[in-house]
């Protein structure tokens, strides 16, 4: 999707711990790595490596791997998917608390690494983590995959899910970000779907809606059907 929407590979930095598309038990299927370099993987995917990427390369990487080469004329999409706890996300080598994430974003802003940043976090406690960040003056627009009101396993199916993939896809397809920012894209998408509750919370500048986040899952989503089936079922 990135390639089809004119994002050159030189502008994409990939960090992953487990290389699922090349997992030895998966044979055939789509080659997700076509024309794409995985820059940091396995034990090289650390919080220190991520900090160096976000700073634009304060430390010289001996392998010459990519870091943010952007300026205040550029927009940056930061997509994170992984485990988390109430106030932290997990990198392979250690947890990273919200305050440390705040410092990383502050440094990227102070270093002139972007004009606007769009942060999508897919993690069980992403809402709680993002709610602890102060993004108002950093021009960071964030979406969480889980409500900030969700605690532990309580009402996981009925309250916690927010399908952020449509918004990520719309951002990628909206390459000319100067004429159509991420929030405007999200608003247009929501407004064009009268049956779609405006449940997306935008952290920092605006709340797009106050609906329970599970309502945003579309009927075509398998988990949506599971939600409906489990709505009145007893929970452990």
Image (spheres, grey):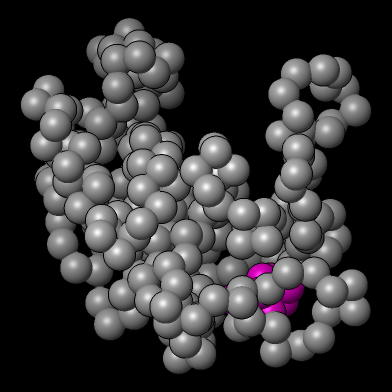
Residue 215 left/right relative to 52: left
Residue that appears at 89% across and 72% down: 63
Q: Nearer the viewer, residue 236 or 96?
A: 96
Residue 88 left/right relative to 92: left
Queried whether the magenta region covers residue 51, the answer comes back as: yes
Q: Residue 207: horizontal and vertical position, in percent?
A: 15, 56
Q: Is residue 129 above or below residue 60?
A: above
Q: Is residue 55 above or below residue 152?
A: below
| Segment tinted magenta in the rendering | 47-54
Residue that appears at 71% across and 34% down: 32
Residue that appears at 61% across and 83% down: 55
Q: Quadrant of the C terminus?
A: top left
Residue 169 left/right relative to 36: left
Q: Residue 113: horizontal and vertical position, in percent?
A: 50, 81
Q: Residue 109: horizontal and vertical position, in percent?
A: 44, 84
Q: Quadrant of the N terminus?
A: top right
Q: Quadrant of residue 28?
A: top right
In this rendering, the count of numbered labels is 0
Q: Nearer the viewer, residue 121 or 90?
A: 121
Would you say residue 103 is visible in this rendering? no
Residue lying furthest top in this view?
Answer: 229
Would you say residue 143 is visible in this rendering? yes
Q: What is the chief secondary structure element of the magenta stretch?
A: helix
Q: Is residue 52 above or below residue 227?
A: below
Residue that appears at 11% across and 37% down: 191
Queried whether the magenta region covers residue 198, the answer comes back as: no
Q: Quadrant of residue 217?
A: top left
Q: Is residue 135 above or below residue 109?
A: above
Q: Residue 136: horizontal and vertical position, in percent?
A: 25, 77
């Amino acid at each position: 999707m990135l390639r089809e929407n004119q994002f050159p590979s030189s502008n994409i930095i990939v960090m992953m711990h487990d290389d699922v598309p090349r997992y030895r038990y998966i044979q055939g299927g789509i080659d997700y790595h076509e024309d794409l370099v995985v820059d940091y993987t396995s034990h090289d995917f650390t919080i220190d490596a991520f900090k160096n990427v976000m700073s634009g390369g304060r430390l010289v990487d001996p392998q010459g791997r990519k870091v943010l080469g952007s300026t205040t004329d550029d927009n940056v999409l930061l997509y994170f998917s992984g485990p988390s706890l109430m106030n932290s996300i997990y990198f392979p080598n250690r947890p990273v608390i919200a305050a440390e994430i705040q410092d990383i974003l502050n440094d990227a802003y102070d270093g002139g690494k972007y004009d606007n940043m769009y942060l999508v976090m897919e993690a069980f406690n992403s809402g709680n983590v993002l709610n602890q960040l102060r993004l108002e003056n950093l021009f960071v627009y964030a979406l969480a995959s889980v409500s900030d009101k969700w605690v532990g396993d309580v009402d996981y199916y009925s309250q916690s899910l927010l399908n952020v993939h449509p918004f990520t896809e719309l951002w990628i397809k909206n390459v000319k970000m100067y004429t159509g920012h991420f929030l405007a894209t999200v608003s247009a998408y929501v407004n064009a779907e009268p049956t779609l509750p405006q449940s997306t919370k935008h952290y920092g500048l605006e709340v797009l809606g106050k609906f329970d986040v599970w309502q945003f899952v579309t009927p075509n989503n398998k988990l949506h059907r599971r939600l409906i089936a489990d709505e009145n079922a007893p929970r452990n």
